[in-house]
Amino acid sequence: MAIDLAQDAHVQDLAERTARFVREVVVPVEEAHGGVLPSDGERVRLQDAARAAGVFAPHAAPEFGGHGLDMCGRAAVFTEAGYSLLGPIALNIAAPDEGNIHLLERIASEDQKVRYLAPLAAGDVRSCFAMTEPSPGAGSDPDALSTTATRVDGGWRIDGRKWFITGADGAAFAIVMARTSGVPGDRGGATMFLVDADNPGMTIGRHIPTLDESLYGGHLEVGFSDCRVTDDAVLGEVDEGYRYAQVRLGPARLTHCMRWLGIARRAQDIAVAWAAERQVFGSRLADLGMAQAMIADNEIDIAAARGLVLRACWELDQGRPAGMEVSIAKTFTAEAVWRVVDRALQLNGGRGVSGDVLLSRFLREVRPFRIYDGPSETHRWSIARRTVARATR
């Protein structure tokens, strides 16, 4: 099976312009604020600059102001954007908005696209995706979903508690996963709802303290109590929420990989530049065998992760489910990026753990990726099951 991973001229040009924009405009802001966006005003300013540079919303359809890139095209551009922690925010391709834009393009009605997708793709509003629940609710096992949506006159009543909802602080609306049939533990029976932030039945709770801080809007607890929505708030069809979640989660796992590969390249660049100038034990650090091994292993991890991501992207672009390929790419990339940043920090010694370079910030940001979008252990379980099933068919 031949796989052509060559990018066309438009994608190559967009990736090059994105690289320049991130290095010249975004990185100085990132370094000035320690990798954490200081305010929503700064988000708007960066997005305006990205729009002026012609690199804004590369994933969104042209009718919504984007470039309409397929998954392989996104891999090239998103990795360049991810060279800075703030690059994805500037291009409006950060989680969770990027995944929600993809989902709304695929599933939303025309009225919902006008009301929710258009302002989200334009960067006029932010959003969140409310699926994860505190134990014993939905997390790594989505079938444990316990939030309910019950039919009432004129629509639905949503009741339940969510947590670790990224971007909920300041989001204009949430895409909420709620059980409309069955009981927790049953397969199926979930429905997606669009809930406006000003709905009195939706309450934004505390910010959960976490290792990472670069995902804008934090990770929050969100409550739903007698939250009333009309029938036109249903996203897609009733009881099809899990199927729609796969429409979002497969590509979102890969776009996370793309963005973090950008940070891995950034960390490697910092490490190599330092190793080339640092004098130690009578020679450059870069001339010492153990340092060379770490530099080489970083290159290997980055190249291997990029290849796995592109293979999974190609499968999705062919219209295939690509569950196996996505799980392999996500698991390997999450662990490889951690190794790359960790080695880069080690090569920088005391400088690496200081605030003089952002490597310690990068390390805190990439560690949770081994849990987000499915822990590595869950993906390994899925990979093993598929492998055994294939062998016994």
Image (cartoon, rainbow, N blue to C red):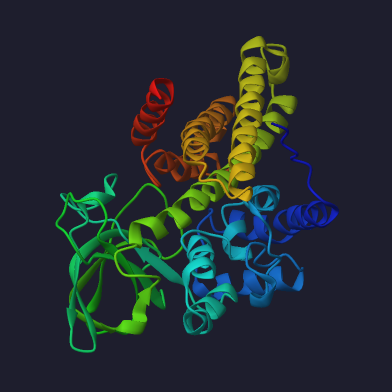
Q: Is residue 101 left or right of residue 84?
A: left
Q: Which residue is drawn at 22% across and 80% down?
A: 156
Give 319 or 203, whichever is nearer the viewer. Answer: 319
Residue located farthest toward the front when viewing the structure as drawn = 393
From the top left corner, tell me how far across and down residue 37 is, in percent. 52, 63
Q: Which residue is drawn at 55% across and 58% down?
A: 33
Seen in the picture, residue 309 relative to 65 is either above or below; the reply is: above
Seen in the picture, residue 46 relative to 186 is either above or below; the reply is: below
Residue 313: image quadrant is top right
Give 29 or 105, whichever is nearer the viewer. Answer: 105
Q: Residue at x 16, y 54 (%)?
A: 184
Residue located farthest toward the right when viewing the structure as drawn = 9
From the top left corner, tell me how far across and down residue 382 is, in percent. 37, 33
Q: Quadrant of the N terminus?
A: top right
Q: Residue at x 46, y 63 (%)?
A: 216
Q: In this view, does 4 lie to the left or right of 316?
A: right
